[in-house]
Image (spheres, rainbow, N blue to C red):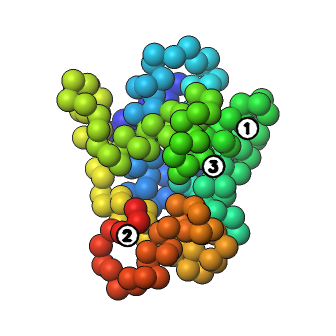
Amino acid sequence: MDVTFGGSAGKDAYEHVRGLLHPAIFNHSIRVWIIANNAAAGLSLTTEECDALAVACLFHDAGTATEYDGPQRFEVEGADAASDFLAERGFDPTLRKQVWEAIALHTSPGIAERMGPLTRLVRLGVTVDFSGNVGEANKELLGLLRQVPRADIELVLGNAVVAQAVMRPSKAPAASWPGGLLAAHLANPKNPGVNEAF
């Protein structure tokens, strides 16, 4: 599928993460962008904000990539990577902070939804992609999403987060989503399917 972005940062981010992420996680990131971009059509985002939204969506799980597997939670590692990526392209620090928050908080229900538009849109993209609750009325959006294979994303993403946390438990604090995944894995390490806490 040909994916288009509103600016050069989104295009660059697409090429960058495509070479780093597991294909299932990369596809999920594209679907999050498609959903968030669709929802953003009803808002008055600037061209630069739309470009930053694309970067936030594409980088939101970048912390699962080997290149960004640092000591912090995968969400924070991805947020730092995206902020650095935008800084290299001359983006305003305020907009970089919004992208950082959007990525760092994308697994934080009840918080992300009350933040700025980029954070809300990334969270919406993630929750809609995992719930499948697109709505049959939006046939164009459904058609776009069907062109990007899911490829067992729940299994792949859960396993990626757990693999990092097993090596560095500090990446999975008890009250976090990674912490829940790690606890479920430790309670049932032979589970061959999707993590029970996903």
Residue 54: in sight, yes or no?
Answer: no
Q: Disc 3 vs disc 2: Cβ atoms closer than 8 Å?
A: no
Instruction: Name the residue beneath numbered marker 2.
Output: 195
Element under disc 3:
helix
N-term-proximal mark, 1 vs 2: 1
Q: Disc 1 vs disc 2: Cβ atoms closer than 8 Å?
A: no
Instruction: Name the residue beneath numbered marker 3.
Output: 104
- Residue at (30%, 61%) from the top-left corner? 152
Q: Quadrant location of residue 167? A: bottom right
Q: Distance between the residues labelled 3 and 2?
A: 21 Å
Judge depth for marks 1 and 2 and give the one in front. 2
Position above or below: 177 against 123: below
Quarter of the image that includes the C terminus = bottom left
Element under disc 2:
loop
| Badge 2: residue crowd in 10 Å (few <14, some 14–19, many ≥20) | many
N-term-proximal mark, 1 vs 3: 1
Amino acid tagged 1? Lys
Quarter of the image that includes the N terminus = top left
Give the image location of residue 99, x and y in percent: 65, 38
